[in-house]
Structure formats: structure tokens, C-alpha cells
Amino acid sequence: MTESPLTLYVHYQHQLVGTLHWNAERLVFRYASEWLDDAATFPISLSLPLSGEFSETESHAFFVNLLPEASVRQRICAALKISPGNDFELLRAIGGDCAGALTITETAASPQRSVEYEPILDKQLADWSTGTPDAFSAITGQNEVRLSLAGAQDKLPVHEIDGRLVIPKGDAPSTLLIKFASPFYSHLPENETFVSLVARRLQLPVVDISLRETAKKRIAVIQRYDRVAVEAGFQRLHQEDFCQALGIDPRQKYEKEGGPSLAQCAAVIREHCSLPIVELRRLVDWVLFNVLLGNADAHGKNISLLYKTNGQRVLAPFYDLVCTRNYPKIDRHLAMSIGGRTDPDLIGIAQLEQFAEEIQVGWRQVREAAQRLVALTPQALDEAAQEFTATWGASPVLARITNIAAKQCKRLDRELTKNG
């Protein structure tokens, strides 16, 4: 295969998957013949079938969804002297350790296996922990550090060796994500950690998250579910969020902007997950939990499909669970409508019935899930608060989030009770 400066190469587990070209507007992907000729391979996205019958728009959407967004992207581009709209050059610079299992390189040859890491100094971590300066843009793309994480929040993929956080270089995999305090939203790492603990108490599938103290602020430390330990180190697992699966640009991740709806998410699960009945139950729990815990940012990029080593395609553990209602400046309206409504205070039996119909799940199943979560969430809040305080000490978000969720539980309980 002839290499060109206008071509990037996509690899999976050190196999060449295909090529990316830039046509001045879009990232154009084509599968490599050796990938297509291998009976054990698979389409890297539901929107990119092996037949090649996909549009340039769908091709571009999948790969641009691997890149950071909003102000994080702006700062990275400024640091690397890349035009903010140049997705191709940004992938060239930082596409070495993306979400999932794909690696993007400048050569068709398989990336060299690397185990090289750069230590993070305690002072450096403490400075980053405040949310300013931006850690991701300060590190990625510099000195063989090629990390790409989608999303608008400042976070950094790292690894841990002997208790010390280190930054992957070259092809070395990250195994953790660290998230920092926000200069705009108070106690954000504590918020996400607490809400995730509540989800775990409710026996929902959720990422493993904890807090770590620095000299200035706490940071959230999250185990990557798309990395698994193997005898030779760590294996990357393939994944795609629902914007990628549906071929939707990340700038349109909210339903009102053309992003995924719950009906579309359910259709993907029903058609493509290995155990759709199980995964649809998880989708219902995810939707209801976000309503009860005041998470208005549950959009198409905050729910993903995970491709397991046994070939199963399942919903990924729930992640980015934050009580956004804790912050008055954030719009409380949901990213995906439920029964035609986005105001969580106006979602009642009629909306839940319509939701059940839209996702083609029996109303009894949705009602029982709602009754179960409404009944169990108050105790889960108390237990999670006790666990949080015993492990990391007090935080003002515990009482505020508990109050927000308790009110929603009482409101929905009244709705369920009066309607039998």
C-alpha cells in the first residue's frame, strides 16, 4: 500500500483496518483489502458496514467522534498549531490512544508495541487538579504522547505503576481516566463519584470510580472499561458511542439538534446487541436513573456499545453520571426526550407509557423498573453518602444531590401510586 502524507492508517490490535483520507471537508474511510479478506474481522461501526455502503458523512462522523470537543479541542489545536476545523491533522497528532481499540497512525505498518510511560509529578497533578491550566491540551500531542478522548470535559488518559499515575507514550495503552475540578462547576469530581456510587448501590452496571487527593483538589480516577488485563499487559476493547453507531456528528449529539433519540438507541440495541432483552432493561434503568438523579446531559455520546472479547456486543458500563441539576446555570431539560417531554418535572405516567411504546418495551416492564428505582434510591443515596464520607470525607454535594434525587423520587412515586 502506497503511503501518502494525505493518508492516515487505522489499526485494530495491530491489524490494518483501513485508510483515512481528507477531502478538504470530510474524513473519508475505506476498509483495507486484508481486513475484508479476514473472516474473523468485523465492521468497526454499525454505521460503517464491511460492504463499504456508507456515505462520507457517516465516515466522517465516526472518526470525528473520537476527538475532543468544545473548549478542550480549541486549546489542543492552539497548543499544536492546528486549525480548529482540521480533523485530519488533529487525528494525526493525537489518535494514538483513542476510546476503544483503534489506533490511528501515519504509516500502514503495524504500530510498535510500547510500554513507555512518563511519570506525572505530584506538583503537576496538583496544578492540573484545579481545572486550570488544561491538562489534556498541555500533554497530548507533545513528546510522543498521542492521546485522544472525545467529550468537552478536561480529562486525561493515564496508567498506574506502583501507585503512581503515568502518561502513556507512543502506542502504550492508558488504563485509567482522571477528571479534574471545574472552574465553572463546583465539586464536579465529587459529584460524579457520588452519583456513580448511588448507581452501584442500585446494582446498575457502572464504571469503577474513586477519588484521589492532591495538594490542591480531589480528582476522579476511573477504570477504563475498554481496557482489560491480559498476560502480556493490557488489551484494548473496541467500543462505539451511539452517535458513532448512528453516523451522527458530535456537534449534533443532543436530540433537539438531530442527535440520537431513545427510540433510535433502542432500535440499535434490539438489532445489534447479543442479548437485546437484557440490554433494553439496562437502557430503561439508565433513562430512569438519570431522571431521578438530575442528570440532564445523558446524550448520544454518553452511552456506548462495547465489543467484548467473546464476540458479544453489549451496552458499556454507565459513565459520565453527573447530577447536572446541582448547577443552576445548566439547563435542567433532558438531552433525550421521554414521551415527548424533556422537563423532568413534567414526566409522569403518560410520558413513561409513551416511552415504553417508543422503545417497544412492555409498559409493565417500564413501570416495574420505575417502581423499583423509586423505592430503592433513597436508601442507595444514604448508603452511598456513608461510603463516600467514610472513604474521602465530607462534601457539600452529598446533601444537595440527595435532596434533588429525593424530591424526584417522591414526585414520581406519587405519579405511580395515583395511577395504580
Image (cartoon, rainbow, N blue to C red):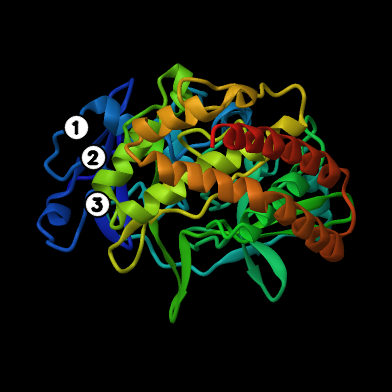
- As helix, strand or loop, the secondary structure at mark 1 comes to loop
- For marks 3 and 1, the one nearer the N-term is 3
Q: Which residue is mark 1?
A: 54
- Locate residue 334 relative to residue 269 in the image: left or right: right
Q: Are marks 2 and 1 in contact (CB under 8 Å)?
A: yes
Circle 2: residue type: Leu
**At 60% across and 22% down in the image, what residue appears?**
346
For label 1, count other residues whose C-alpha is less than 10 Å away and answer few (under 14), some (14-19) or many (20+): some
Residue 397, by quadrant, is top right
Circle 3: residue type: Val
Q: Position of residue 73 (x, y in %)?
A: 57, 31
Total marks drawn? Answer: 3
Q: Position of residue 276 (x, y in %)?
A: 31, 52
- Locate residue 72 relative to residue 66 in the image: left or right: right
Alpha carbons under labels 3 and 2: distance apart? 12 Å
Front tag of 3 and 2 = 2
**At 66% across and 34% down in the image, what residue appears?**
414
- For marks 2 and 1, the one nearer the N-term is 2
Q: Nearer the viewer, residue 264 or 80?
A: 264
Q: Which residue is mark 2?
A: 48
For label 3, count other residues whose C-alpha is less than 10 Å away and answer few (under 14), some (14-19) or many (20+): many
Q: Is residue 121 above or below residue 261?
A: below
Q: Nearer the viewer, residue 368 or 312?
A: 368
Circle 1: residue type: Phe
- As helix, strand or loop, the secondary structure at mark 3 comes to strand
Q: Position of residue 375 (x, y in %)?
A: 65, 50
For label 2, count other residues whose C-alpha is less than 10 Å away and answer few (under 14), some (14-19) or many (20+): many
Q: Which residue is mark 3?
A: 17
Q: Nearer the viewer, residue 93 or 36?
A: 36
Q: Nearer the viewer, residue 418 or 127?
A: 418
Alpha carbons under labels 2 and 1: distance apart? 6 Å
